[in-house]
Amino acid sequence: MIRLSNLSKRYPGGFDALRGVSFEVDSGEMVFITGHSGAGKSTLLKILTLIEHASGGQVVVNSRNVARLPRRDIPHFRREIGVVFQDNKLLHDRTVFDNVALPLIVAGVSHQEIARRTRAALDKVGLLGKERMYPVTLSGGEQQRVGIARAVVNKPALLLADEPTGNLDADMADQITDLFHDFNRHGVCVLIATHDLRQIQRLRKRVIGLKDGQLVVDSGNQAA
């Protein structure tokens, strides 16, 4: 599913966010990416979604060398990847339904299919009864669930999450992480960038650790 070979990212001014990072993630695997603030976790996820471009090395996602993707193919490539952000990035002037449906609208999916898939995604995260509400009326955990529903509404093979439990209490963090685990059990490849060592220890999935932009830990299937 993912193959990184000697990946590097240097920002203007000479800051190296990633230096010589290499690892592979199989289809259907669930992996936690951890490290201190500034270790390179968010940069790594941004490169996987082509929000950022690597300075060197090779990035292969779902058998595609992302550096060689024509610009016209990037939107379609991104539809194959679900992304969940810590701050949700919800549109607060749109209903829950409209927020989740947005990727399908952009993709030109039919109205009937949009309704079916949006409600199925909301049902999966336990928010079907709140589809006509606005994000501001929801709790932090519910807003994060809306973000997850939006990320999976396109039925991606790969789901990326950047600190998805960072603003949540322990109980809600457990619920959100369990949602990702459930998607993984249904065959979705999941990568979660997190500081939440409790979730890592609780699920005991593979851990990839970054420090100062370098790979320092790859635990296989054992928790750190």
Image: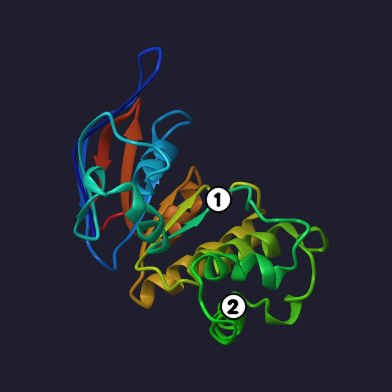
Whole-percent x and y of residue 198?
50, 52
- State which quadrant residue 136 falls in: bottom right
Q: Look at label 1 and name its amino acid.
A: Phe
Q: Earlier in the sequence, mark 2 or mark 1?
A: 1
| Direction from residue 161 to residue 49 in the image, left or right | left
Q: Which type of secondary structure does the marked residue at label 1 adopt? A: loop
Q: Is residue 112 above or below residue 56?
A: below
> Which residue is more in the foreground, 26 or 114?
114
Residue 122 x %, y %:
62, 77
Badge 2: residue crowd in 10 Å (few <14, some 14–19, many ≥20): many
The numbered dot on residue 118 is 2
> How many numbered tags mark residues here?
2
- From the viewer's perspective, is 105 left or right of 79? right
Q: Amino acid at mark 2?
A: Thr
Residue at image coords 34%, 47%: 71
**Residue displayed at 55% across by 53% down:** 164
Judging by the rendered image, the residue that carries numbered circle 1 is 85
Please indicate whether residue 10 sits to the left or right of residue 160 in the image: left
Which quadrant of the view contains residue 182? Answer: bottom left
Front position in the image: 23 or 154: 154
Q: Secondary structure at mark 2?
A: helix
* Quadrant in the picture for residue 132: bottom right
Residue with the most extreme front position: 72
Residue at mark 2 to residue at mark 1: CA–CA distance: 19 Å
Image spot of residue 169 (x, y percent)? 67, 54
Callout 1 environment at 10 Å: few (<14), some (14 to 19), or many (20+)? some
Residue 61 at what x, y percent from top left? Answer: 26, 55
Q: Quadrant of the N terminus?
A: bottom left
* Residue extending farthest right: 137
